Amino acid sequence: MGDSVESSNVIKIPVDRLALGMFVTAIDRQQSKVDIRNPGQIKHRDAIVKLKKNNIAVVWVDVERSSDTCGLKKGDRANAPANPLARKATVTRDGQQAQAKKLLAEAKGLIKKVMSETFEGKPIEVGQFEDVADKMIESVMDDADAFKCISALRTKDAYLLEHSINVAFLLVTFGKHLGLERELLKQMAVGGILHDIGKIKVDNEVLHKPGRLTPEEFEHMKLHQVYAAEIMRETEGLSQVSKDVCLMHHEKLDGKGYPHGLTEDQIPQHGRMSCIVDIFDALTATRCYKEAMSPAAAFKILLSLTPFHLDQKLVYEFIRCVGIYPVGSLVQLSDERVGIVWDSKGRDALHPIVKCFYSLKHKRYTEVTMVDLLKAELNIERGVSPGTLEVDPTPFY
């Protein structure tokens, strides 16, 4: 690894190589070792995020005081207790996508079942959503790219289910980027999954209308938040954070949102985050009455809604978190090939790995090729909306 040994037990390693369970004793400041006030094991990835935010590139780790499952100890690994949040380095991208697909199907099935039960007046059991939220957080902490690719596959007839899952996933991803605690991420994810639950009581003709709503229809649509509040009141064990995410995603900082017309100082950070991710996911989804927008185009709209509707600082952070060309999005390269942004870890936004499969120039499929834009003499020309392609990109995810 190119690490220098400080003593028989303490090694110097890059922050990028830190894993859960490693015992950090000191940090590197301007090439000098500085002991930290509260040395201890890395319990959450939030701690690693904070180190990076503070421009810490190297730390000192005590091998003996690190957990058996963090990857530093070779002897007892077979007998070590499983740590569900530890990075599974041996899992391939295909394996991760299979896990992500399974989680997505489980979440869809759960939301569909709960919506049906809620429509019949049955109470919501929060525990089952917490289980899904936990799995979602593990997926994001381990490697969010697989879930991003799977969640990019949208279908017009399952918008409500997919939108709920994606809002939850985006909240977890955004929260991780901001360094929020795991328990808060979990409560936000539950709120995201349930954020549109009130729509089960909205008239189907209004809910699925393939066009712009009339003023009267829009007023009826806004009632979904009133219905949601009623459902929330009858739901035991739901945290205030989850309720806020559900009931604040249509509020605006200037007080002109609904259902309560809350103003800037009344909307907490997680409520403001829910407004941003709800709009972004709706804009980038294919609906029965509109094509999906590219992420870059959606970002322009988010920025246009600041500072009166959305929190400007949080919008900029969200753009940094998601990236101009997010994993799972379609792009056109300078040689007119189209591909899926496949991997962006450790890279700047303009140089991901792109999985190319189609040529706009020749109007035909090409051999599937992974193009590393850090090495190729190519660049991204633009983001591509799926609806503008004459072919279906789905088989290549």
Image (cartoon, rainbow, N blue to C red):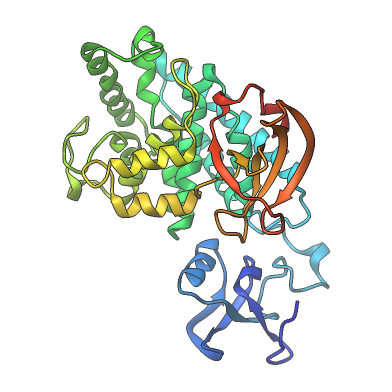
With 304 as the anchor, is 299 left or right in this view? right
Q: Residue at x 67, y 38 (%)?
A: 339
Viewport quadrant of the C terminus: top right
Q: Nearer the viewer, residue 26 or 232?
A: 26
Give the number of callouts.
0
Q: Is residue 198 above or below residue 192?
A: above
Q: Nearer the viewer, residue 91 or 209?
A: 209
Q: Is residue 213 above or below residue 391?
A: above
Q: Residue furthest top?
A: 205
- Image coords of residue 198 (percent x, y): 35, 23
Q: Residue at x 17, y 43 (%)?
A: 263
Dividing the picture into quadrants, the one containing residue 231 is top left
Q: Residue at x 39, y 17 (%)?
A: 200
Dividing the picture into quadrants, the one containing residue 64 is bottom right
Q: Is residue 42 above or below residue 192?
A: below
With 99 as the anchor, is 286 left or right in this view? left
With 40 as the anchor, is 68 left or right in this view? right
- Image coords of residue 97 (percent x, y): 70, 40
Q: Residue at x 54, y 67 (%)?
A: 48
- Image coords of residue 199 (percent x, y): 37, 20
Is residue 242 shown to the viewer in this render?
Answer: no
Viewport quadrant of the N terminus: bottom right
Dividing the picture into quadrants, the one containing residue 368 is top right
Is residue 133 shown to the viewer in this render?
Answer: yes
- Image coords of residue 84 (percent x, y): 66, 53
